[in-house]
Image (cartoon, rainbow, N blue to C red):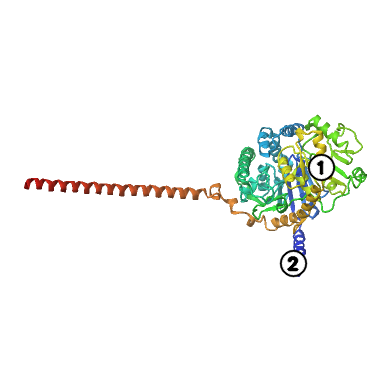
Amino acid sequence: MAVQSLGIPLLLLAVLAGCGQAANILGLFTSLSPSHLVIQMSMAKILAENGHNVTVVTALKPPHLHPSINHIQVPLDEADGKSFGALVAGMAKRDTGNAVISMLLAMGSMKPLFAKMEDVLRHQRVKDLYEHSDNRFDLVILGYFMNSLQLSLAHKLKVPQIVALSNPPALLGTVLGNPSEISYVPAMNVVVEKGQTMTICKRLENLFAFVGSWIFSLLIEQNNDKIYKDLYGDDPLMPRYEDLHKNISLIFFASHGISEGPIRPNVPGVIEIGGIQVKDQPDPLPKDIADFLNGATESQGAILLSLGSNVKAVHIKPDTVLKMFNVISKLKQKVLWKWDDLENTPGISENILYAKWLPQDDILAHPKIKLFITHAGKGGVTEAQYHGKPMLALPVFGDQPGNADAMVSQGFGLSLNLLALEEQTFRDTILDIMENPKYNQTVKAFSSLYRDRPLSARQTLLYWVDYVIRHHGAPHLQSPVVHMSFIAAHNLDIYALLLALLYISYWISKRLLSAIWRKLSLKGVTKKRNSHLKHKTKKQKKQKNQ
């Protein structure tokens, strides 16, 4: 028991000791999704707070920036902003309920995303990072969202890199050696109840989802490859586009498989940091928000309503907004409503406080919050699970329908279709979650499981970042698959060889059997002919003797 009690303190001591030497770290976080940026900037903040020299490149302006972080912004111009807004609006109006179909339908409208990725790499302030010899970096952390093209920056800087994702790595993970276990690991938007095996229908659905994701990824990679050749086609020092991933040391992804699922095999270089954006201790709330929540009664509590940062007020149908206001304004609870257009709010009510931006994690940590009405983005669901808050999901697009379905299947709340929202259903669902203790009890039990880890997400991040730097990219963590061709990695050459050997064996056997058959047939004919001649001779002799 004494040895066991020393285990965790010694491990924590190793983590802290490993982080004692400051490193120069570059974060490339150019996603146009504010929710992705929240997770990525949380990583940067943790590294900066622990003594590392952190520089980040973003397209969006972070809502809060740690004073020790050097920030480079390649901002969206007005046309980019409008194009991205149109993309989100289009996706918000489609009732697909399926992430893969939603993304495939939006392919033609994704030019702003790829244009911004290219703009970042062409921007002079970004090029200065590797063109000026005074700039020295030890590591690049790339916020990944369909931007394999930007893996090129670490090659320019000649340093190892770590990739950060919001969800478990799918096709990128496969490239790095993570097995694709389609028979029991559900793809995005395929929901399987925890502890249950997939039925044949569910496995068929999973196969189609995997193939759809693969097709989507193939289209994205073709586009990235074209841009990469335009950027670096004449640079002999740059690798081929398909070899960019060979410089990836680790993948961080914001999930916790033991509690959230799915249970799946991961290679050593795939590390879980689910809940990285959740603070160990919440920050004090702004005075207006704190006063508003403190004014809620203990019995009734308060509700947080946020549909994320991508979906703006103009993206939601006016009649849907009116229905939501009619229900919320009549509730007994105080409601914090994230609303980006404060000059045109849905309506005025004493129980509603509108805010353009809300410190979501800090608010969810408040004991008065009894319900979270959310778009079911990965970050928000994670924060609600961590703080043990029941949810009502109103998913819009992307991975949100799948996140909502998973949340419902685990018993943390309910989900409604935002595009077909009705007042009575909305009201009844809110009251059901608020008044039925099973949702609160279930998510609080999950919160305990989610937090129970040998190292927190923060400690895990610090340890592995330092590990990669200390071991100069830690190439020993890489799966051999990283350096194998597609043919060799999938044994296609072995299968081809076996098929060839089987065919050759078949051909030889066929020829041999044919030869034997011909010989036996010829021998039989000869024997029959000889027998016939012998019989004929005997008959002739007999006739002659008569």
The percent position of residue 4, horizontal first and vertical second, equals 74, 67
**Cα distance in 3D space between marks 1 and 2:** 45 Å
Identify the secondary structure beneath mark 2: helix
Q: Nearer the viewer, mark 1 or mark 2?
A: 1
The quarter of the image holding the N terminus is bottom right
Of residues 332 and 186, which is closer to you in this image? 332
Q: Residue at x 85, y 51 (%)?
A: 282
Horizontal side, residue 302 vs residue 5: left or right: right
| Identity of the residue furthest to the bottom in this view | 2
Q: Position of residue 255 (x, y in %)?
A: 72, 50
Amino acid marked by disc 1: Asp
Number of other residues with Cα within 10 Å of mark 2, as a class: few under 14, some 14 to 19, many 20 or more: few
For badge 2, the amino acid type reads: Gln
Q: How many residues crowd mark 1 within 10 Å: few (<14), some (14–19), many (20+)?
A: some
Looking at marks 1 and 2 on the same chain, the residue that comes earlier in the sequence is marked by: 2
The location of residue 531, given as percent across then percent down, is: 19, 48
- Please give the residue where the numbered disc 2 appears in the rendered image: 4
Q: Taking 356 as reference, is 181 left or right? A: left
Is residue 240 visible to the viewer in this orientation of the structure?
no
Residue 270 image position (x, y, % from top left): 67, 52
Of 543 and 37, which appears nearest the observer?
A: 543
Residue in the foreground of this view, choosing between 291 and 532: 532
| Tag shown at residue 93 | none
* Residue drawn at (87%, 40%) of the image: 335
Return the residue at label 1.
Answer: 432
